[in-house]
Image (cartoon, grey):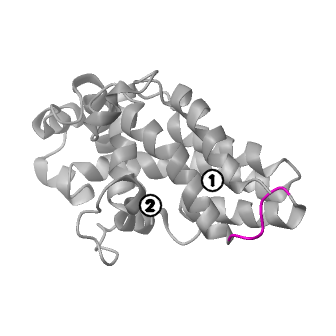
């Protein structure tokens, strides 16, 4: 469902095989070293321009070591996405599910958390587009304990329906999909400084500012969920 909102997925039909994660501390440390060198290289040079030979030179490892841990260059972006999602999206949603904060505010905070980080704008945008267009691989990396944002939004919508904060004549999953698509599609596609995959969105006000776009799009999308 995520990829339908943003663009066609890359032929994914089932979870792909993932590279094994090292179990020993030495292997974990080396993988982290490679990951951090890749993120630095992507931040400095842009994802498309960054060269693996520079990454492995920075990390002091071989090409084979890089591809053992990250079979595709894009897998570094997915790893970034997993790290960011667990810290800034999942936690926000769980706080809302476990407390009494209004559902509207929690869903907004979840989306805002997805859209912001300390990474350069071009790198954060590249990460978001990768996790949006390879949802099966991203979900496999997240694991069963971290539902995708559509599922989290649907859980929150169901809570809102029980409280009378959200309309009940439409199912929670549909509401979650509509609000997520209406809010996140323009923010992800036009909110970052590299290149939007949909050129037509470049004319949006505040292009390059994902939160400014979210602040305009979210209230419009949320109206469809109001009772």
Does 83 sit left or right of 194 as displayed? right
| Relative image position of residue 209 (x, y in whole percent) | 47, 24
In screen coordinates, is 214 left or right of 27? right
Which structural element holds mark 2?
A: helix
Towards the viewer: 7 or 69 = 7
Q: Which residue is mark 2?
A: 2
Q: Is residue 69 above or below residue 185?
A: below
Which residue shows up at 72% across the image and 56% down it? Answer: 94
Q: CA distance from mark 1 to mark 2?
A: 16 Å
Q: What percent of the width, then of the height, locates residue 96? A: 78, 52
Residue 93 visible, this orientation? yes
Out of 75 and 159, give the one closest to the viewer. 159
**Left or right position of 118 against 152:** left
Give the farthest residue toward the bottom.
Answer: 14
Q: Position of residue 226 (x, y in %)?
A: 76, 53
Q: Nearer the viewer, residue 149 or 72?
A: 149
Residue 168 within the magenta-colored segment of the rendering: yes
Q: Main secondary structure of the magenta part?
A: loop
Q: Is residue 26 visible?
A: no
> Residue at label 1?
90
**Picture coordinates of residue 123 (x, y %)?**
34, 33
Q: Secondary structure at mark 1?
A: helix
- Indicate the quadrant containing the C terminus: top left, top right, bottom left or bottom right: bottom right
Task: Find the magenta span and give its range.
Answer: 165-170
**Residue 67 drawn in magenta:** no
Q: If you read the primary sequence from the N terminus, does the residue marked by circle 1 or circle 2 appear first?
A: 2
Q: What residue sits 35% from the left and 34% below the top?
A: 201
Q: Which-is-in-front pick, marks 1 and 2? A: 2
Which of the labelled discs sits on residue 138, or is there none? none
Q: Quadrant of residue 165?
A: bottom right
């Amino acid at each position: 469902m995520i990829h339908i909102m943003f663009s066609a997925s890359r032929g994914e039909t089932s979870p792909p095989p993932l590279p094994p994660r090292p179990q020993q501390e030495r292997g974990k440390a080396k993988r982290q070293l490679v990951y951090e060198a890749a993120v630095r290289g992507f931040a400095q040079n842009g994802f498309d321009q960054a060269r693996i030979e520079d990454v492995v030179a920075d990390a002091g490892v071989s090409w084979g070591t890089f591809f053992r841990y990250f079979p595709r260059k894009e897998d570094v972006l997915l790893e970034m996405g997993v790290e960011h999602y667990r810290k800034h999206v999942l936690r926000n949603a769980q706080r809302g599910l476990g407390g009494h904060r209004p559902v509207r505010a929690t869903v907004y905070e979840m989306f805002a958390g997805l859209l912001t980080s300390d990474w350069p704008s071009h790198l954060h945008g590249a990460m978001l587009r990768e996790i949006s267009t390879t949802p099966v691989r991203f979900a496999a990396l997240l694991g069963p304990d971290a539902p995708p944002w559509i599922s989290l939004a649907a859980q929150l919508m169901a809570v809102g329906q029980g409280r009378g904060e959200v309309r009940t004549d439409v199912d929670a999953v549909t509401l979650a999909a509509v609000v997520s698509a209406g809010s996140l599609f323009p923010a992800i596609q036009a909110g970052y400084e590299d290149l939007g995959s949909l050129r037509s969105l470049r004319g949006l006000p505040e292009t390059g500012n994902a939160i400014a776009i979210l602040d305009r799009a979210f209230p419009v999308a949320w109206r469809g969920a109001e009772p």
